[in-house]
Amino acid sequence: MFRWILGGREAQSSVEKSPVLCIGEEQPKNWFTELQVLKGHFDIVRFLVQIDDFRCASAGDDGLILVWNIETGERLQELRGHSQQITAMTTFSCSDGLVSHPSLISASSDRSVSLWDPDTGNRVQTISDLQSSVKCLLVLERLCLWVSGGEELCLWNRDFQLQCQKQSHSDTGITALIELPKNCMAAAMDKEIIAPDSSLTVAELRCLSDHQDQVRALINVSDGLFASGSHAGELILWDAIDWNILAYEHILWEESQSPAQAEIRLGAPKPSEMSIQQLSTNGKLILAAVGSGLYVYSVLTKTVVAYRKVAHDSNVLHTMLLSDSEVMSCSEDGSVRMWEIQDLPLPPVSQDSGPPKKIMDVPNIRTLELTGDLIGHSGAVQMFVSFKENGLVTCSADHLLILWKNGERQSHRRSLALFKKLEENGGL
């Protein structure tokens, strides 16, 4: 393990980097000052899954699944069996009497799905005769069932026996799955959101067709709410019980432009600039990755509360709300960034503009201020998993995982371990 000095980052594309995003070496609010590089993959690492408080699994285009100890960085298991890239992975815990044993379910482009024991590295179950590749997985723990989505929607029991299935009849297939109340679930299929009834008979589906473009993200906000985001920048908040629309927001970034820029862009944003790639939530706020920007939406007020139009040099791939005022994001540009929700500075008041406005008259919109830039990856950072005080794990197209730690906390722990060892050996 070694120390890493955090400094400025060179933009990894031809896009000119905004000077306001060039944070220097002084980052007092960024406590990720120590990192450990984890090697073992031979291709893009796309997925990270937390197994328990001290273990995570990684998977990607090399078909490997590796299990890691995030305290030590040790590689605990290497799960081999897939012949092509991993397309989805999740944990599966089903109570066996009083003990709930965590397992892993993985899907691959080789049209197979496997159940793994992360303790031993053994493949417990496998399905290898699927008609198409699985793009997403969902575990319904209360029912000991799991769902796979691709060109077809399938419901399976804990023994990997097919219960029912439904063809998607869509070019894109099923791209996202979430669990809803009353033993229900929802799936994204092209421009629609489909869901079976509480009996989970996927032959009978309810269809919501309110999006104007492909649904890219689904997220369960709370017991009674879920949200969806589309390629056209539509964010819809839904009642998970009655399936009614509670709020609709259309996100379009409109940057001020010079006449030359306006001529080139013809006044219209590129599709990638308004596409919602991913959603995260803490139940009170929804954080949307929109092109290269970030968008914070309040579930309570159903309004935008903060935004950063250009948060990265390329598309944002993954986000997380660390608290009600702190967020984290990673991007295709190879960066992992920490942000703080702050008030926008009030515009100066001229003498000719009349009496100054009261604070309550100013629109309640805030900005995201960069507080930390985690520099370590040389390729697109696909996602990250937070282990809270135990650290953060990121995975990237550079074939690496990086384990980020609180340097001060780690130094204190090493000092305590050294003093304990000295005491055991009778001092110096």
Image (cartoon, rainbow, N blue to C red):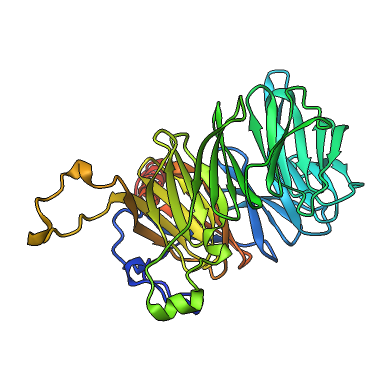
The answer to which image quadrant residue 383 occupies is bottom right
So how many labels did they put on this image?
Answer: 0
Q: Residue furthest left?
A: 351
Q: Position of residue 243 (x, y in %)?
A: 62, 30
Q: Residue furthest top?
A: 97
Side of 347 relative to 297 (left or right): left
Please state which of residues 18 and 273 is positioned toward the viewer in this rendering: 273
The correct choice, above or below, for 140 with respect to 4 in the image is above
Q: Position of residue 177 (x, y in %)?
A: 68, 40
Q: Residue furthest right?
A: 129
Side of 83 relative to 207 (left or right): right
Residue at 82 percent across and 37 percent down: it is 154
Q: Is residue 392 visible?
A: no
Q: Is residue 406 visible?
A: yes
Residue at 86 percent across and 32 percent down: it is 164
Side of 100 relative to 312 (left or right): right
Please state which of residues 119 and 271 is positioned toward the viewer in this rendering: 271
The answer to which image quadrant residue 25 occupies is bottom left
The answer to which image quadrant residue 325 occupies is top left
Q: Position of residue 419 (x, y in %)?
A: 36, 45
Q: Position of residue 227 (x, y in %)?
A: 56, 39
Please state which of residues 336 and 123 is positioned toward the viewer in this rendering: 336
The correct choice, above or below, for 338 with respect to 153 in the image is below
